[in-house]
Structures are given as structure tokens and as C-alpha cells.
Image (cartoon, grey):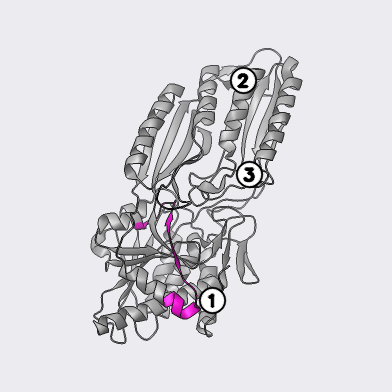
Amino acid sequence: MTEIRMPSGEAERDTAAIREIFGYIASIPRCSGNEDGIARFLRERVVDAGCMVKEDDAGNLFLGLPGAGGGEDAPPLVLQAHMDMVCVAAQGSDHDFAREGIDWYEEDGILRARETTLGADNGIGLAIGIRLLEEPGPVHPPIQLIATREEETTMHGAAALDPAKIAGTTVINIDDEEEGVITTSSAGMMAVAFTFPAHRILVRGAVSWQTVEVAGGRGGHSGMEAGSGRANALSLIGTLLTGLMAETGCAVTTISGGERDNAIPGQARACIGLDPAVVKKAVRFIREEGRACRETYRDTDPDLRVRIFPATPQENVISPEIAAGVVSLLSGLPAGVCTMDVVIPDLVATSCNPATIREEAGLLTIGLSARSNDDATLAALGETFRRQGKEAGAAVSIPGVAPAWQYREVSPIRERVAEAYSDLFGSTMHLRGLHAGLETAWIAQKIPEADIISLGPDIRDAHTVRESASLPSAGRVCLLLRETLRRCVEVREEE
């Protein structure tokens, strides 16, 4: 681990303030699509700091603070974060994300939540942005904090940003999850839905009803953790059911799994019907496959379990043709890394994540997210998915596509931030490309001349109930950004 030199008490004061602001943010329900409450809090909070508040037609907020200390006429610096969070609860939890805030706590400077995601992605980024609007330092250019909606689902907020309301062409996104790193590019994303009619037929004769379950997968962000090799529960349940259909024959009455399109699914289950004569064979098959899965994923998913156990009797099952199509698609869709980048070491270039399967209103839908650092590759994947879906008997829709954000050779803000970090903390920042979608891609598309970077404090296991965030790291990032604001004015004066 790189040693970080700790500065004076300024970072500690920032840490305490960020903790207080994050506490307010965490108390407000803010799943994607439910951002009105947090938007109201942001508007009311920053008015006392002398900020101007604007809103575009998509509900994005633009919170502006005039420059000071000689920076009144300097080019503005734009900070950007998103208001929503991924809402995932532990199995068995009755947490109501629509009505309840997050039950969070601090332990040795680390923030965690009880039985749910923490929402540090991107609540900590918002808290840092608010802190800088309230305490920007005596010398700074005009500052704008853009707070967007629905980043965790459709990125509708960023996609619909009104470029006329963006105050400047120097942009720092505060939605990264590793201190000491500057992200300079990101992957494009595509959401795909495969929909089957859930035709059902009545059951006749003796049937042994069983539940096949994959649970305990570690999950995680499907972009950030794409190269981790973690188990995808939907792919595994598809493989298990494919094997059962071949070994013993089985009918499928329900199948479900996953929680969010941008999270690796850690659990899935299916209720199946078996001929009583083959139950022992089916149990033996699942147990053998379970042992093989645990061995395969013993390092990445130590708590993974595969089991079969008796289920409640059912009156009907999904028609065999539809069930076969669903199962074949689940087992055949790519999961995890498709290709690695040929230029940047250890960077995933293209990945896929079968993420959810749900039955609703007579339709069975598989949701998948794909990512690539090349827009043409993503478009080609879309055509492949259309073909696969058609072959399986599914209707295929692509409800959302986000562009990739390309590396910029010359970036004054990148150099300025890296120099400030070195001077403050005695450590060198590293550059990376990110295999995840960032709202920076939409800003770059709308303002091609924009100089954009992304950074943030240490956050671990985002999008899972193990999510945690380092408060001291958040304080250091806040201090870094305040110093960067000062240097933006100083550099202008020198020029």
C-alpha cells in the first residue's frame, strides 16, 4: 500500500463535515427514480451557502457558487455527482427503501450499513461536493455542482443534461471508488431485455416438487468487478437446469434471481417438477454440480452454495417449449469477461452480465447489461443478442445504450490534480481506464472540448450489502479538490 502523508487538521475538519452531510443524505430514501427528496434537501442546504440553484427538464440540479479571492472571472470548475443509489437488502431483510433511510454506522473511520447497501456510491461524492460549496476556501473560481438523476439504472439524468446549463468545460466527476487514482476513460453500456410469454399448462399425475437454489454468491458491481471471476448465479442456474433437463427431465414452474441490472447476481432459484422415480438421480446430480461449483469459486465466492430441497406443490408449469428457451438462453448468454484490452494491461475491454430474471403480468424477462470501451463492439453485441434471443423464442429490446468515454491525450486538469495530490500527501496518483459506465461519457458527448476526469475516496463492495466507505479518505479527497480550486486561480494569474 502506498504511504500517504497526512496533512494538517483541515482534512480532519472536512472528514467530520462530510460525515454530518452524509448522515442527512443517508436518511433520505433515494433509489433510482425516487430522487425528489434528496433534490429538495440539496436545494435547501446550499441556499444558505450563497449558491444559485437551477434545474433542467430532467430534474438535474445545477448548484452554482461565484468565484472569490481573485477567482471571480476565472473559468468555472464543474463538479458532478449523482443523487440516486443502488438499493439492495440482505436476504430476509424487510427494509423498505421507498420509505426508510439507511441504517448506517461508523467503525474506526469506516462507514457501513446494516442489512442494506450503504449508498456511499454516490452519497459520499454528493457530501464532498456540498462541503466544497459551503467551505471552498478563500481563493477559488466559480464552482458548479451538477447533481444528476437515475445514474444507477438508465443514466437518464446525464443523457438528458442540458449543456447550456453546464457552467464550464473543466469537469471533475466525484463518482470513483479508489483514492489516489484518476480515471480517464470509461466503458459504454447497453441494457438488454429478453422477454418470453409465460404460457402455462396444468399439471397431471404424480409430481415431486423441488427447489433448485444458487445462493451466497459474492455479487458486486458488474463493471468494476467484471474481471473478478465471481460466480453469476443466473448462468449457474441455467447450467443446472440444462443438465437436469438432459439427465432426468424436469418441468419449470418458477425461476427468479438477481436484483439489479448493474450488479452481478449472487442468488437465483427455480421451482421444478420431477417424475418421482428420478428424484434421487436429480438430487445426486445437483449435489455433484454443487461440489464442482464450490471448488471452482472457492476463492472468489467462498460462501457460494448450490442445493435442492422439497418445494410446495404447484398447479401448473411453464410450457416445455418456453422453459427450454429460457433455460438455454440463461446457460448460453456470455457472463463475465468477453475480451481484455490489448493496450492497457489488466483492463477488461468487453463484458456481459446476465443480471435479473423476473415473471410479471404473464411475461418472463431476463435483464442483461453489457459494457465495452468501444461503441462499435457494443453495437455488434446488440445484434448478437437479438439473434440469440430470436433463436430461444424471446422478444429482444435494448432500452438503453450509453457511450464510451475516450482517453484525452492532453488534460490540464488531470496534471493539476496529480500535482496537488503529490504536494499534499507525498504520493503519486495513478491513471486508469474504468470498465464501468460513468456520466462523464454523456458530458463528453455533449461538450466535446471538455477536459474531464473522475476521482473519489475509497469505497469497497459498492452495490452490495457489504458496501463500505472510508471517511478519512473522503476528507483527503475534499482537501485535494479545495487545493485544486485554489490552483486553478493561481495558474490563471500566472498566465
- Element class at badge 3: loop
Q: Which residue is mark 2?
A: 245
In the orientation shown, which residue stands out farthest toward the top? 205
Badge 2 density bin: few <14, some 14–19, many ≥20, Cα 10 Å: some
Look at the image and say whether residue 426 sits in the magenta stretch. Answer: yes
Q: Residue at x 56, y 50 (%)?
A: 220
Q: Write the residue at 54% across / 62% down.
A: 459
- Amino acid tagged 1: Thr
Q: Which residue is mark 1?
A: 15
Question: Which mark sits nearer the N-terminus, 2 or 3?
Answer: 3
- N-term-proximal mark, 1 vs 3: 1
> Neighbour class for label 1 at 10 Å: few (<14), some, many (≥20)?
many
* Precedes in sequence: disc 2 or disc 1: 1
Q: Is residue 292 left or right of residue 61?
A: right
- Residue range in magenta is 420-440
**Does the CB distance between marks 1 and 3 fall below 8 Å?**
no
Task: Looking at the picture, tell me which residue is in the foreground, 412 or 465.
Answer: 412
Residue 99 placement (x, y as % from top left): 54, 56
Q: Residue at x 50, y 61 (%)?
A: 177
Q: Which image quarter: residue 374?
A: top left
Image quadrant holding the N terminus, namely bottom right
Residue 283 appears in the picture as rendered: yes
Q: Which mark is residue 217?
A: 3
Residue type highlighted by circle 3? Gly
Could you tell me residue 198's position as x and y percent?
Answer: 51, 25
Instruction: Specify the amino acid type for callout 2.
Output: Met
